[in-house]
Amino acid sequence: MSNMLSSWKEIAQFFGKGVRTVQRWEKTLDLPIHRPPGAPSNVVLARESDLEAWMHRGMPHGEQAATSEDLNHAFETIHAYLRDMESGNIEAGRSRAEEFKNLSDRIESLRSAVHAAAGQSLSDGSIAA
């Protein structure tokens, strides 16, 4: 039987990502999250087996790669984030290491979007020019 994860923090730890990243995945990439009927909206459940299956699935038919507008927005967001970090505007309660991890996650998401838009999958971590 598959283990049940019962919080955003547990789900994020399962993937080795931040809470906001997996919350975004639920909204944009159909991460299989369940909310018990009648429970508050912040109560979430997920089966590890469902998350593993989701992680290993391919891009569904009909799903389009990111548009250039999406990619430009992502670059602008990361650039603004870097300016905030440079000026010391770090979210309350977060360490600089957590902010760098968050930035790294954002860059990795952007790299994936660029690869999807280009129809490429580079294993060495570089972005094709």
Image: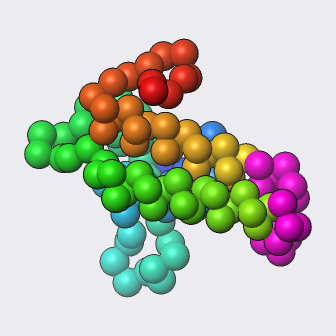
> Would you place residue 121 above or below residue 93 in this image?
above
Residue 34 position in % (x across, y down): 37, 62
Q: Main secondary structure of the magenta part?
A: loop
> Quadrant location of residue 96?
bottom right
Q: Is residue 13 left or right of residue 48?
A: right
Which sits in the foreground, 58 or 45?
Answer: 58
For the point 47% across and 83% down, the residue is 40
Residue 99 position in % (x across, y down): 77, 56
> Quadrant location of residue 129?
top left
Residue 8 in sight here:
no
Q: Is residue 61 left or right of residue 69?
A: left
> Would you place residue 116 above or below residue 129 in this image?
below
Residue 129 in sight here:
yes
For the point 45% across and 61% down, the residue is 73
Total marks shown come to: 0
> Would you place residue 102 above or below residue 119 in this image?
below
Residue located farthest toward the left when viewing the structure as drawn: 62
For the point 45% across and 24% down, the residue is 128
Residue located farthest toward the top when viewing the structure as drawn: 124
Which sits in the foreground, 10 or 62?
Answer: 62
Q: Please state the extent of the stretch shown in magenta in the rendering.
A: 86-100
Which sits in the foreground, 41 or 90?
Answer: 90
Q: Is residue 61 magenta?
A: no
Image quadrant occupied by the N terminus: top left
Q: Is residue 95 magenta?
A: yes
Q: Is residue 71 left or right of residue 62?
A: right
